[in-house]
Amino acid sequence: MKVIVIGCTHAGTAAILNAAKLYADAEITVYERNDTISFLSCGIALYVGGVVKDPQGLFYCSPEKLAELGVRTKMSHDVLEANLEQKQIRVRDLKTGEEFYDKFDKLIITTGSWPVIPDIEGIGLENILLSKNFYHSNTIIEKAKKATNVVVVGAGYIGVELVEAFETNGKKVTLIDSEDRILSKYLDKEFTDKAEKALADHSIKLALGETVVKLEGEGGKVSKVVTNKGEYEADMVILCIGFRPNTKLVKDQVITLDNGAIVVDEYMRTSVKDVFAAGDSCAVVYNPTGNYEYIPLATNAVRMGTLVARNLVKPTTRYMGTQGTSGIKVYEHNIAATGLTESWAKTAGIDVKAVVVVDNYRPEFMPVYDSVQLKVVYEKDTRRIIGAQIISKADLTQSINTISVCIQNKMTVDELAFVDFFFQPHYNKPWNFLNSAGLNAE
């Protein structure tokens, strides 16, 4: 069995490592346009902020390790064309310029995603950077040495983490987003208010509800960001607007969402026989709604890549869907979320209710205790849990993983009230705050 893998970040690495162990007789070849694999881009802000000193720790695999498993590792090779019907790809060696064809019995598409780059005036100026891979992180760190005013465009997780890292390094920082709140896809207003206050308290300028209309420069380098409401000095601009699936190779050959994300079934099979896909190039089943959505997360990618390997010869292990569970630390606040927010649910036309619990997470007789704020969103009629958010100075984010399981298993908010949690004064109260949310739901 000849297996070709296109792309080798999280999903590709997981697929290869597992396939190499499961199918000893398989001939596995990976084509990757970069010369590195498995870089944890979620660690870029930690690297930029100096928390991570050695970036090699952000790699959990290497081409050498794959080669030891018998995998033909073709780094710095760009796949130019894929003919799925003929089971053939055309490849260019980026170091020599040589082009050649290769055939497959099974194809695994793990081409990932790429940052959204707006088509606006001045986008080609120097010091306008992306934040996606290892090379981007090195460029950001090098350029930041000479930068005083840093503007980050996009207030999702990456943007928010980067502005904190830059502020910690003594930069004057502005965060711009067209939405009127940061992290608006993940958190409701009562949570983003706290996160925004933390940023503002550290002198980070928040330019929310503003859209970048052009970038101005001097001597070929960016000097100013112009929005529909203001202007901001900038020696360096980081674009964190979002991601698009990198699927041009198979356009019009497989079923996709409108944005190009490949639709796969529960066994990671595309609409073409013997062609599988995983990771940021794919749509996923979003359990809160049951619909296909585009949710590029490393956690989804490694799960899907592992499932591709298990299902490569025959369907054995199905994908259980995702809740889009995620977390972030904003200064002293530990924040996590899963599923739908109340605001997004209402925008989607889902009739929901929400219960909010604000309590000290452990007994007040303990020497130290912190407040926790938890919000659980549930369908009004069925009372099925479809989302939750948490914020606390104590790290209680793992509780959101518990709610993620509740959503995946279609539990109701009433059932949450009586789930069996242990009690120990060091950690919680006799009624865990998750129980309290169920008890207090109307």
Image (cartoon, rainbow, N blue to C red):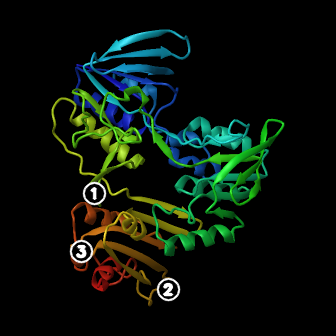
Mark 1 residue element: loop
Mark 3 residue element: loop
Q: Residue at 49% x, 25% y: name it.
A: 33
> How many numbered marks are there?
3
Q: Which residue is mark 1?
A: 287
Circle 2: residue type: Pro
Tell me whether the residue at label 2 lies in contact with that at label 1, contact meaning CB atoms closer than 8 angstroms. Answer: no
Q: Nearer the viewer, residue 291 or 399?
A: 291
The N terminus is located in which quarter? top left
Circle 3: residue type: Arg
Question: Dot 3: within a 10 Å radius of its alpha carbon, few (fewer than 14), some, or many (20 or more) residues?
Answer: some
Q: Which residue is mark 3?
A: 383
Instruction: State whether residue 57 appears in this view.
Output: yes
Q: Nearer the viewer, residue 196 or 381?
A: 381
The C terminus is located in which quarter? bottom left
Q: Residue furthest bottom?
A: 365
Q: Which residue is mark 2?
A: 367
Question: Where, by quadrant of the figure, is residue 13 drawn?
Answer: top left
Q: Residue at 27% x, 39% y: name it.
A: 264
Mark 2 residue element: loop
Circle 1: residue type: Asn
Please say if 259 is above or below 178. Answer: above
Q: Residue at 29% x, 59% y: name it.
A: 289
The percent position of residue 397, horizontal first and vertical second, equals: 42, 66
- Left or right? Give the position of 159 relative to 87: right
Tell me whether the residue at label 1 lies in contact with that at label 3, contact meaning CB atoms closer than 8 angstroms. Answer: no
Q: Nearer the viewer, residue 226 or 363?
A: 226
What whole-number distance in Å separates the C-alpha atoms at marks 1 and 3?
15 Å
What whole-number distance in Å separates the C-alpha atoms at marks 3 and 2?
38 Å
Please say if 225 is above or below 26. Answer: below
